Image: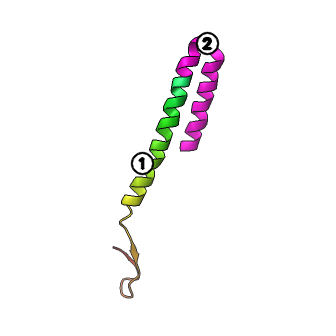
Amino acid sequence: MLAYSSFEHMGLIVFFIGLGPAATFPAVLHLFGHALGKPLLFFAASEIMHNGATYHFVIDAQSRGVWA
């Protein structure tokens, strides 16, 4: 989903650059905002996955596997 969003944003940036000089500066701002924001989303997602992984599957002879 995140990669699809990047394609959409790059399409918007190319579209705005094609509109002419008046839209080039906002397109470049959008480019930098996307270039800074997307890695932060990936870093946040990996941090949540790393710190939130508290569930471990335990194999027990009596219970045949429980979430601990």
Residue farthest left in this picture: 68
The structure residue drawn at horizontal position 58% and vertical position 43%, both measured from the top left corner, is 3
- Position of the C terminus, as image quadrant, is bottom left
- Please tell me whether residue 56 is drawn above or below residue 25 in the rendered image: below
Pointer 1 local density, CA inside 10 Å: few below 14, some 14–19, many at least 20 = few
**Could you say whether the residue bearing mark 1 is in a helix, strand or loop?**
helix
From the viewer's perspective, tell me whether residue 67 is left or right of residue 24. left
In the image, 21 versus 56, the foreground residue is 21
Q: Which residue corresponds to mark 2?
A: 21
Numbered circle sitting on residue 44: 1
Quarter where residue 11 is shown: top right
The verdict on residue 15 being magenta is yes
The structure residue drawn at horizontal position 63% and vertical position 15%, both measured from the top left corner, is 19
The amino acid on which the numbered mark 2 sits, given as a three-letter code, is Pro
Q: CA distance from mark 2 to mark 1?
A: 35 Å
Q: What residue range appears in magenta?
A: 1-27
The amino acid on which the numbered mark 1 sits, given as a three-letter code, is Ala
Q: Disc 2 or 1, which lies upstream in sequence?
A: 2
The verdict on residue 19 being magenta is yes
Residue farthest bottom in this picture: 61
- Please tell me whether residue 55 is drawn above or below residue 63 in the rendered image: above
Q: Is residue 2 visible from the viewing direction of this image?
A: yes
Q: Is residue 1 visible from the viewing direction of this image?
A: no
What is the magenta segment's predominant secondary structure? Answer: helix
Q: Position of residue 9 (x, y in %)?
A: 57, 31
**Could you say whether the residue bearing mark 2 is in a helix, strand or loop?**
helix
From the viewer's perspective, tell me whether residue 40 is left or right of residue 62. right
The structure residue drawn at horizontal position 63% and vertical position 22%, both measured from the top left corner, is 15
Q: Position of residue 47 (x, y in %)?
A: 41, 54
Pointer 2 local density, CA inside 10 Å: few below 14, some 14–19, many at least 20 = few
